[in-house]
Image (cartoon, rainbow, N blue to C red):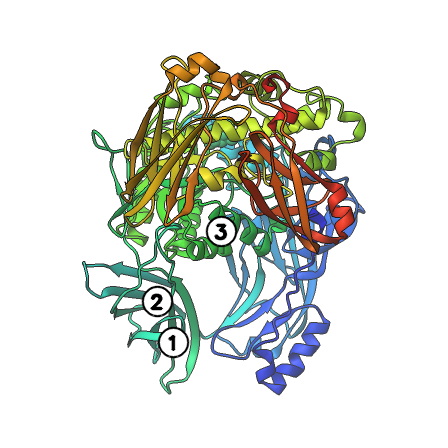
Amino acid sequence: MSQDAHFGMVSHLTRRRVLQGSAGLGIALMLERSGVALDAGGAGPIVLDLGGNQWTLHEEGASREVPATIPGSTYTNLLAAKAIPDPFFGENNGKVQWVAEKSWLFERSFDAPDDLHGKESVELVCHGLDTLATVELNGHPLGDCNNMFRTWTFDIKPHLRRGRNQLRIAFNPLNDYVAKQRAAYKEKYGIDLENERSWVRKGPYMWGWDWCRPILTQGIWKKIEIRAYDTRIADVGVFQNHSAGEAVQLEIHATVAGRTSGVHAESRVSLAGQTVATANGAVTNGEAILQVAVADPQLWWPNGMGDQPLYTITVELLDADGKPVDTVTRQIGLRTVEVVPPSADVALHLRVNGLPVFAKGADWIPADNMPTRVTPEILRWYMSQAADCNFNFLRLWGGGYYEEDELFDLCDELGLMLQFEFKFANASYPVKDKQWMDNLREEIEQQTRRCRNHPSIVIWSGNNEIEYFQGYDQLFHDFIGGIVHRLVPGAFYEVGSGAHGSGDIHSWGVWHGNEPVESYLGVEGFVTEFGMQSTPVPMTVRAFIDPADRQSIDSPVMQYHELDGSGHGIEIIMHYTEANFGQAPKDFDDTLWLTDINQAWMMRYAVEHWRRDMPKSMAAAIWQYNDCWPCSTWSMVDWYRRPKTVLHQSRRFFAPILVSGLPDLTSGKADIWITSDAPKNAVGDLVWTVTTADGKVLRQGTKQIDLPARTSWRAEELDLSDLTQSHGTGNLLVWPEVLVDGRTVAQNTLFFGRPKELKLQQPHLTVTTSGGETRYRVVIETDVPALWVWANVQDTDAAYSDNFFDLRRERSAEIQVVLDNPMSPSDFRRKLQIRSVYDVAPEMRA
Ligand code: BMA
């Protein structure tokens, strides 16, 4: 998936409604030629989309001018014009910081169709201005903006001309503004907030974080349009009331803007196109409240626990003659959510539709330093991957930006529960500044209204890791909490995550505390952050680093693309890799692979512990799911969307049924635990085999077992102390497997101590391939146990149905490989590499 493919220009032309009216058609074609899209056919406001490539970007006070596409920013447009080097390559990031220190002007002209003027309200709606912007239409200043998380709406009826109009949006650098605000606040309240992030409502990560360098974008980062109407539906909120076994009561609140006299509202609730309930009602004080009962409710469940039926709520406004004037739809899922506080034996946990759920997943960060490059297709890829890997939970981390509607829709569709975190992280804020708070109120209200109907949002959280400061409670408890409780009655809101006053845990003894992997065994609860760094896969490293800099993992450019606060993250990666897998190989690429395998083993170790520990532990969310540029971090998949070992393995350690255990080096005991997150009880078989490292079977056992739903228990206690004496711990492998109806639902490979204790034989892997073009089937067999076996089509982007698995002598593994681009069978065979940990961990060789 070469990145460029995803920079395709987005077409703004929506022709659907225009074709209904020939007059409309004439206007539309004329406007299409002048680069705006008019949406004027059906019920609803006339909308003129001003996005597209008709803009110019001009550096204030300089001659530099480039064509511009909106949504977009200074960086995306200068990059497209080749006016700056790619900030992601080598050490280029430092060479493009000047852009953020300049003032820039985005400008375009457009023709306004006559029927815009016929409406009572004509507004310029800017869904996202990043960040310090001044908006001007035909020379008339409309307003100053200072919050990238708000929609800014301006009344332009007095200023809009018939025919050609000129729109200019100027963006100013942050420094002066920040310095002025800081000085004024200090002057007035004697409080000095040093952190720039405290002063400007902008994605905190954009100033750089411990996994990315600064890219302070400026630009029109979301849709910009002219909206004309007499009456419109401004917002729809849907509130659910579930009482056991009966219909679900829905209360639909439709907020109406513009003229309300003579209009009334109708709503329809449908499932898979079938209407299941309707209601209608008057509009009073700008609001219609409609009550409906949904009989035989189809409940929404998290991934792995059931389906995700989504109901469509359609709200229509009709005028006195019964003619529709506006229609809005929302998608909801019928479900109840509780967050149960911790008790003696049970951690803080989620209950969905009355059933406890172990939250499995990761922390989501922005998918790009330049947010406008993140397309719906990219979001769909990440969310589908997460669901395929048995995630049921993602935390939308507080240091990014509020995500697009598409992300929430995808999580509703895929059953990915979300911890929605407001965008505050690791700083204190000027709570005493009334203007700052008023600005914030708009942001929090708009974002809460926009996201509140999504069934996927199960936890609302005020911030990331903010320690107490003067005004903390006022801001996070009273102010933000107050808005959430008012707009989403009954929702669970916690003031913050991982610090003051929060119930969830950020476990950083490993990595930041330099503690060994075994220290995870001392942590339990609702864990929403823990992590281990690794480098990206070799193909990604080759994309951001010159061959000359690929001699060693700690070359200057490799260091430049690793940003742990310690300043020596690469060393920490190697410390843990060698502590667990022994001395690193000489080869550069092999070292990269081994750091990935190490990260995966450590995350598996932690997750398996917390899942065995259920219900004393009820969540395991890995820091971090993704990256926003190519670099070495805690991510499970890199910016090019190339999965790391840990993502492949998460499909197994997050699977509904898990079989795991930690054979004990001292006692020679090897307990086998089974954890079921399955929604229903089942019956199955536990089969286990103990072999030597070269595959000789020493002992076997099998027994029928119950698999009670949502339970973790020790299913077998093996005393292998005699075998550890006779064969040595490094020469023993325990292979537990759980079968239901004869089908393997879980398997694992257990060994004593850390991987480096193992003394493996060199596996001779037999590979058979078939297929052609982009789809290939690969069958792998081995003569001795082969651990962490992986397939890699060199220098080729491909999706693997499975990877980094363990293989026993008497078994074969079959994987499907789907290439981004067609390849001949002979080239595929030539480029296909099948390797195992034996190839990259010299100390694990017997
Ligand atoms: C936690 C997160 C992030 C950070 C990560 C790794 O603090 O909340 O802020 O990137 O640890 O250090």
**Dot 2 crowding, Cα within 10 Å, few <14, some 14–19, many 20+:** many
**What mark, if any, has residue 298 been given in the picture?**
none
- Quadrant location, the C terminus: top right
Q: Secondary structure at mark 3?
A: loop
Q: In screen coordinates, is 139 left or right of 739?
A: right
Mark 2 highlights which residue?
254
Q: Earlier in the sequence, mark 1 or mark 3?
A: 3
Is 194 or 309 nearer to us in this picture? Answer: 309
**What mark, if any, has residue 150 been given in the picture?**
3
Disc 3 marks a residue whose amino acid type is Arg
Q: Position of residue 504 (x, y in %)?
A: 35, 33
**Residue 548 visible in the shown view:** yes
Real-space Cα distance between discs 1 and 3? 26 Å
Question: Residue 294 falls in which quadrant of the image?
Answer: bottom left
Is 68 or 125 nearer to us in this picture? Answer: 68
Q: Secondary structure at mark 2?
A: strand
Q: Earlier in the sequence, mark 1 or mark 2?
A: 2
Q: Is mark 3 within 8 Å of ligand 1?
A: no
**Dot 3 crowding, Cα within 10 Å, few <14, some 14–19, many 20+:** many
**What mark, if any, has residue 317 been given in the picture?**
1
Question: Residue 686 falls in which quadrant of the image?
Answer: top left
- Contact, mark 1 vs mark 2 (Cβ under 8 Å): yes
Residue at 73% across, 30% down? 91
- Contact, mark 1 vs mark 3 (Cβ under 8 Å): no
Q: Position of residue 211 (x, y in %)?
A: 58, 31
Residue at 47% across, 15% down? 727
Question: Residue 774 falls in which quadrant of the image?
Answer: bottom right
Q: Earlier in the sequence, mark 2 or mark 3?
A: 3
